[in-house]
Image: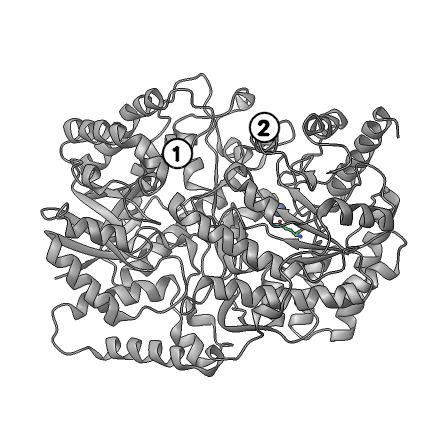
Amino acid sequence: MVIVSNLGYPRLGENREWKKLIESYWNGDISQEDLLVQAKALRKAFLIKQEELGVDLIPVGDFSLYDHILDLSFQFNIIPERFAEEDYDLDLYFALARGNKDHVASAMKKWFNTNYHYLLPEWTKEKPRLSHNRLLELYLEARDLIGDKAKPVITGPITYVALSSGVRDHTAAIKSLLPLYKQIIQELVDAGASYIQVDEPIFVTDEGHDYLEAAKKVYAYFAKEVPGAKLIFQTYFEGLVDAKVLSNLPVAAFGLDFVHGLEDNVAALEAGYFADKVVFAGIVNGRNVWGTDLRDSQQLLAKIQEHVKEVVIQPSCSLLHVPVTTQNETGLEPVLREGLAFADEKLQELRILADQSGLVEPSPSFSQKVAAFEALQAADFRHVVLEDLNSVAKERQLPFQDRYALQQEKLNLPILPTTTIGSFPQSAEVRRTRLAWKRQQISDQEYEDFIKSEIARWIKIQEDLDIDVLVHGEFERVDMVEFFGQKLAGFATTASGWVQSYGSRAVKPPIIYGDVQHIQPLTVNETVYAQSLTDRPVKGMLTGPITITNWSFERTDIPRQDLFNQIALAIKDEIKLLEDAGIPIIQVDEAALREGLPLRKANQKAYLDDSVVAFRLATSSVKDSTQIHTHMCYSNFAEIIDSIRDLDADVISIETSRSQGDIIEAFETATYPLGIGLGVYDIHSPRVPTLDEVVANIERPLKQLSIEQFWVNPDCGLKTRRKPETIAALEILVQATKKVRKRFGN
Ligand code: GLN
Ligand code: ZN
């Protein structure tokens, strides 16, 4: 008999109940008690659902009120110094995540190569101590409901420390956490827990090599101190960095990813490292939305079984990264819908596979899944003839210096030009009106007029603020990727395919299911309208091919590079339309370029090279006097700075204010010759920056970068902010810029 396990279940809920719940608490609509009661109800519903789907080992502790890493920091009292005076309560927990009126929030970072963001643990001088055993509370709650099926889940000490900031001595930090983990685990064991999943995904990254000695010590410590614990050393997103060493850890089981780490992990099995081990095998892709070819999985399972003592099957990683269920997707073509699998369907697939293991003939549900898989592969939308790449320009005509001079002259900009990243607050009215339009309560014309009035309002606001390069504000978009998905051929938009991005923020990635083509103007109307209202340059706003791919659920039946290029050609067509309509600056956002970087060095170059080719296919066909901007989110640019330069965008804006230091360093060591705006304030928090802060943020990089190349902008789009704080912050931004310009004699 094969057992089915799960690593983590989406928090959001089928209809984003979780998001609504948390936000209603933040907005003061419900009390803290209501929040906790309703969160508990959700948690229970998730457990029951998984039980009904036939999962034998159900994760507990994956649920969170914001982020699972923040949960750990909070219970370990790893709380930044600046919050030291605050009471230790739920509001402090949320303040760490979102900032409060006195203090900035902790930084967010991408969870490995996903679009999930965790709150960066900030270590200060104080020693960690356990304030409460959160996991025990959750386990007890789950045990009452699902008994033995409850499997506690916790991020392991090594990964936790490796992902932290402010740690001087990693070994000492890990050591300081061990007694805390020991207590948590011991109390779980005492309460009856069997398997306990300890997530250590750091051991699939190159950095994992540095922690091999720590792994030996830590897991030997647990084996000795809590001998009754059945720990699963859980990894995902790639194969183990050193299976030989890690397979010797004294744990009860190993969780391995046989989707993203297929080659390495199979090689490790074949080398015999797991011959006498229990392996939790991730054989259904936890990151994509496609139905699995169960025949392949069956073969894979058989192969794994040959090489291990016992196997449990599960998704390749937590299902946090996929939407809940395809059941509500009644708007999709049947052949597509049947070919999809979200969290619930993935668990079903695992159940079907497990049940199949004792049978000779395929069960009806097995056959049905296979038929759906085959029908999708054969569909004609996957077999379109596309434009030839050879006839498309891959570089600009003039080198940067020459064309930049042309552009700045045409645009007539001051030094330190000010601009924003594209979106302005999507007020309740914007959202309400869009909903009314979607429900056909107002006509297309009424909706269009409304969007125009919003554009006009914000063009005026930007002029009044004295910003130099204006944007139309993106009011017509819910999401920078979904919007393009709705208008390009080859994409499908789901009704409720939401996934958590950070905190209560969810995104609804479109699904790229067929060949991508530009079949209608995407942004021309709104952009041209905005430009008609002002003499200042308006910047067109598009999303780039890599970001569209990374933030979509992509098809996996063609090489990724082909997909990048298909999208690049579609964006090129749109850029041409904007340029022909007189738009002087076009921004092609590559917000997600960095996060898509493969975890292992060995795979990074190919990805970056493909990205550069696609970006240049999209942007190189313009006139030299047309200025191409790009924008990227988050830090850690050091390792990809060469590729960023190779994109050859005239101006890049980068999100930096939560990690100024790192980024400047990257630009210091590799001189960056092109136009650049380093975000001068953090848009993720409602807090309005002070003049001095912004002046400092403008001046600091000017030590390394020339004033001619520097732009001033907030650090990302302003969509999620409210209007008053947005205007207040932009006022400061412009004021600060003017102050610095004066110092430079302008
Ligand atoms: N242009 C987009 C916006 O302003 C960019 C968002 C992003 O980088 N995530 O919303
Ligand atoms: Zn951004």
Q: Is residue 657 above or below residue 526?
A: above
* Residue 422 spot, x, y in % from top left: 71, 51
Given residues 173 and 713, the one toward you in this image is: 713
Q: What's the distance in space between the residues labelled 2 and 1, CA to CA?
A: 26 Å
Considering only order in the chain, which callout, 1 or 2, is on the residue closer to the N terminus?
1
Which residue is tagged 2?
661
Secondary structure found at label 1: helix
- Residue of label 1: 72
Q: Can you see residue 145?
A: no
Give the farthest residue toward the top.
125
Q: Position of residue 271 (x, y in %)?
A: 15, 48
Query: Could you tell me which residue is drawn at 24 percent across and 72 percent down?
Result: 295
Residue 633, quarter of picture: top right
Tell me what residue is drawn at x 44 percent, y 46 percent: 37
Crowd around label 1: few <14 · some 14–19 · many ≥20 (10 Å): many
Left or right of 148? Residue 598 is right
Circles 2, 1 touching at the beta carbon (< 8 Å): no
Q: Amino acid at mark 2?
A: Gly
Image quadrant in which you'd find residue 584: bottom right
Q: Amino acid at mark 1?
A: Leu
**Depicted 458 relative to depicted 690: above or below:** below
**Residue at image coords 55%, 68%:** 566
Foreground of the two, 199 or 672: 672
Work out whether 344 lies above or below 239.
below
Q: Is residue 742 left or right of residue 329?
A: right
Can you say which quadrant of the picture contains the N terminus?
A: bottom left
